[in-house]
Image (cartoon, coloured by chain):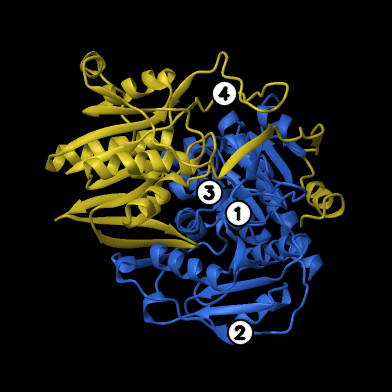
Amino acid sequence: MKILICISHVPDTTTKINFTPDNKSFVTQGVQFIINPYDEIALTRALELTEKSGGSVTVINVGEASTEPTLRKALAIGAGDAVRINSQPREAFFVATQIAEYAKKNSYDLILCGRESIDFNSGSVPSMVAEMLGIPSVAIAKTINVENGKAIIEREIEGGKEVIECALPLVAGCSESVAVPRIPNMRGIMSARTKPLAVVEPVQTEELTKVVSYDKPVQRSSVKLVDAAEPGKLLELLHTEKKVI
Amino acid sequence: MAVLVYAENSEGKFKKSVFEAVTYARAVADMLGTTLSAVSIGDTVDDELSKLSKYGAKKILQVSGEQFKNFSVQGYASAISEAAQKESADVVVMLASFGGRGIAPRLAVKLKAGIAEGAVELPKTSGSFVVRKTAYSGKAFADVELVSTKKIITLVPNSYKVEEKPEAVAIESFSPAINNVDFKMTVKETVRSSSKVSLPDAEIVVSGGRGLKGPENWGMVEELAEILGAATACSKPVSDANWRPHSEHVGQTGITVGPNLYIAIGISGAIQHLAGVSSSKVIVVINKDPEAPFFKAADYGIVGDAFDIVPKLIEAAKAFKAGQN
């Protein structure tokens, strides 16, 4: 089974977010970048699947040279080879186009992504890639199994879950419960240095969206404390001041 | 150039969040000086469909039939794409629900439309078309310009107020072309969750953290939630320890929520958790540590032991609800 894992290079979850004075871009100075946590879950599940029944795991990222440490980390975790599409990940449609173009040339059985990146949170790329390739997709998968060339996937639905079955190939976005990420061991880290990392130039495509500016949520005014002896007061305040109950 | 809203149903009924999306889409249509059409897929009775008119849909397209009984992301995306062409819709609106999040990107590729996933406000339409959405998992907002002619917006539940704007009911049956390639996926089993209120679109959320010490202590969280008509949630360490299911994990790598009221019990307020709840209208924190960072992000706080406070709060909530009825 040939599996492709789409990796985003994102600020660590503990990062305090800051923007440039013109609010047009994210300040990367002093920020630790990581594999998008959901993508790491997808990668881990791919390794579990190929360890069980054979196959290969390739990771792909659309990013400039600065994202290579993130790809090396994915190789250290266990991916066999990596591909970097040499461009800024301008927007979801652009990124999906690049991944779909690469996937068309290499025909994968399974393409796994995180359900969304923790920086832009659109969750569009997996479903866009699937549409571009004309294959089925599951935007938010809870578990992923493959049996006899068919994927068995639990997916989130409103107010519950559904178990679906689908012939491969297929694209799925992984949520937290798909796998427990692994910490790379020393052998993995050593071998990651010599595993292949191909750099591919992007294909041309039009831009459908662009970010005009960023800003941060307004800080809440200071907390109003309620006496622990009279928690009922809290309900009064929620009712009269905020009208939320 | 109309506006089209996809009104998703759950077991034949529209939830309140769908009416939020219809209200929102109607407001977009008003801004653009055009009308709103709605498309519903799957079996829904006319009485239910006509509710969409109440919130401003001038025309309702109903897609039904055997193939559309179960949710098919490809089948539904194709049907909505055809509906958009039929209505000459330049803007398509749907909820940022599990279904909508799967359909919208596929539709974006079909229509070559720019997409704003997770909108929280009406677009700004003077000169350009700019939509505000959450970014960095709730730590920031991004204003995204949709530069393409066709545009898709998915709306975060509970971020836009429902408002009635009645139109005459006009339901039209619509039969899109069926392409078998769209129906390769089969649904083996559907499991409905036992909780009464679903977390992503709950108006009130009661959430517990490690301060509750163990899964056996969740009875009081559930009881408080039930009295308030709230959904239950938890922090990451709690779901990591399997005290509660992952589907209840609120935070940067879990579910992002924006209820009217978020009550956090025994949660210290790590930055990843705060990101997931930052768009809540009112935040209440109950924690025995007065230095817990969550107090800095809260509107109301009670410093004290949850095992002492929550039972008292439950009694007070019962009395409050009894007084309301």
Look at the numbered disc 4 and give the secondary structure of its residue: loop
Q: Which residue is mark 1?
A: B149
Is the Cβ of the residue at disc 1 closer than 8 Å to that at disc 4?
A: no
Amino acid type indicated by mark 4? Thr
Image quarter where the N terminus of chain B lies is: bottom right
Look at the numbered disc 3 and give the secondary structure of its residue: helix
Q: Exactly how many numbered labels are in the figure?
A: 4
- Side of A170 relative to A30 (left or right): left
Q: Chain of mark 4?
A: A
For the residue pair B183 and B2, the one nearer the viewer reads as B2
Q: Which chain is yellow?
A: A
Q: Which residue is mark 3?
A: B218
C-alpha distance separating marks 3 and 4: 31 Å
Is the Cβ of the residue at disc 3 closer than 8 Å to that at disc 4?
A: no
Are labels 3 and 2 on one chain? yes
C-alpha distance separating marks 1 and 4: 36 Å
Categorize mark 2 by other alpha carbons within 10 Å: few (<14), some (14-19), many (20+). Answer: some
Q: Which residue is mark 4?
A: A15
Amino acid type indicated by mark 1? Thr
User: Which of the numbered marks, if any, corresponds to residue B171?
Assistant: 2
Residue B161 rendering spot, x and y as whole percentages: 74, 60
